[in-house]
Image: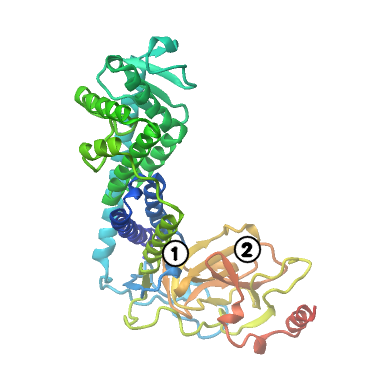
Amino acid sequence: MSAAELMALQFMQASLACVLAGGGVWALLALACRRWPALALSRRAWLLAQLLTVAAFLCVLAPQAAQLSVMPPIALDAQPLSPAAPAAPAAAPVTPAAVTAAPADTGEPSGVWLLRAAQAWLAVYLVGVSVAAIRLALAQRALRRLVHAATRLTDPAAHDGFDAMPAIAVYEIDLAVSPMLIGVWRPRLLLPRHLRQFDGAQQRMIVDHELTHLRRHDPLWMAASIAARTLLWFNPAMRRLAERLRWAQELSCDRQVLAGRPQPQRKAYAAALLGQLKIEHGGFAAALAFGGTGPASMGARMLLIRQGCAQAPGALIGSALATGFGAVFAASLLLQPAFAWRLPGVPSSAPAAPVAWQAPLAQARVSSFFGVVSPLRPNGHRGVDFVTHTGTAVLASADGRVVTSADLDAGGAKFGKTVLIVHANGLSSFYAHLDSRLVAAGDIVKAGQVIGLSGATGRVTGPHLHFEVRQGDRIVNPATVLAGLDAHATASALRNRARLAGR
């Protein structure tokens, strides 16, 4: 199974994780709102729920995310991409022609349907996110056209809604739209000309409503919400959370504008909102508008305006909600099973981790241990060096899949020709300074299979095999997986290691 195929499976898993996380936080907030109705006004709660859903999606895509799972891995049979070679019986030099190919497995690996579904979903996602991005671009273009068709106001006396012209640009248009803020980094206030028909006090409250959005940085909150919803267009919870965020923004602005105002002004404000909704045609979901509605009915908003909105949730409610969010996020990561490949012929009940590794040479003599400091390695040796002659068979230390097989390693020219093999549990083995490589990226190899011939390529003083063990991006001492290194070490290697231990 190739890296691209595993990536498709992981992407499908991340999509499922974010759907479950989104549904979890939505259910949590819905229940909390029944107990504490003031949460309906909390912009932070609804935006945090969206960001947590996005984080669940991205975290599952992280390289080491599978190590966090407490669920058993889903084992998939891997099909070798090239014939497997048997292990060399001795350390004598061999040539590529001497490596005998094993019969290829003609059976179809299990889990093919799951892989095909993952690849199909990845294609559907790319199409869907492109469509969502195009729709967003068209909405932004429509808003820009509104501004271009409007007239900029420069005199505050020309409009009853202003005592003084605000710091942002104000435009007026003949189209029957709602007063709205357009833009994120340079917001502009767009007012419909029919707003002049309203009472002066109503005009000032409507304008104050939009300017309150600006003071509270609501355009930034909304932009983050739109970006999250576009990225996870397939998640139904994202649409619901975005609607509730928009509703919370409108309700909290209503509360702030009406704070301390007498009942007649509250009634006038509600009448202005109702009158605006009767006049305007259509809405723009990409802008903050005075007439924006939410999941509750307009009657419910009118009731809140006339009777007063509840205060925002306190610190205790916020702490309880944050704890619940953390539990949902942790569950979305810990309860996601990892996808693990297994070699053909290995029973499904076999453990994912290898029982033991073997030395990469049939006759292995250590010339330099892990961590030893020398003039050539002031930061310590990253692996183990084995004494060998050019042309000696280099063996895979454990079952695995070849990730890279190259004449020039990503680490630089110092390693020469290299092979990197990934094994179970995230471990990988690295073989450097090879004279030739007998496997290609994507090949499935067995422990003891010949993967190359030793040599002296790269920056070396003589032929030898440099061997490393890695856990992700972290270097691991090969002695933790290879037994008996001390018994097969040169005297100088033992002295150098003892000198290092005595410091």
Is the residue marked by circle 2 packed among few (<14), some (14-19), or many (20+) residues within 10 Å?
A: many
Q: Position of residue 151 (x, y in %)?
A: 37, 12
Looking at the rendered structure, which numbered label has been put on residue 65?
1
Is the residue marked by circle 1 packed among few (<14), some (14-19), or many (20+) residues within 10 Å?
A: some
Give the quarter of the figure containing the C terminus.
bottom right
Q: Is there CB contact under 8 Å for labels 2 and 1?
A: no
Identify the image quadrant of residue 376: bottom right
Secondary structure under tag 2 reads helix
Q: Amino acid at mark 1?
A: Ala
Q: Is residue 202 left or right of residue 93?
A: left
Q: Is residue 503 left or right of residue 183?
A: right
Is any atom of residue 423 visible in this view?
Answer: no
Q: CA distance from mark 2 to mark 1?
A: 29 Å
Identify the image quadrant of residue 70: bottom left
Q: How many marks?
A: 2
- From this view, report whether residue 118 is shown above or below residue 190: below
Q: Position of residue 224 (x, y in %)?
A: 41, 41
Which residue corresponds to mark 2?
Answer: 415
- Colouring method of the image: rainbow
Secondary structure under tag 1 reads helix
- From this view, report whether residue 404 is shown above or below residue 302: below
Residue sitting at 24 percent across and 43 percent down?
295
Is any atom of residue 185 visible in this view?
Answer: yes
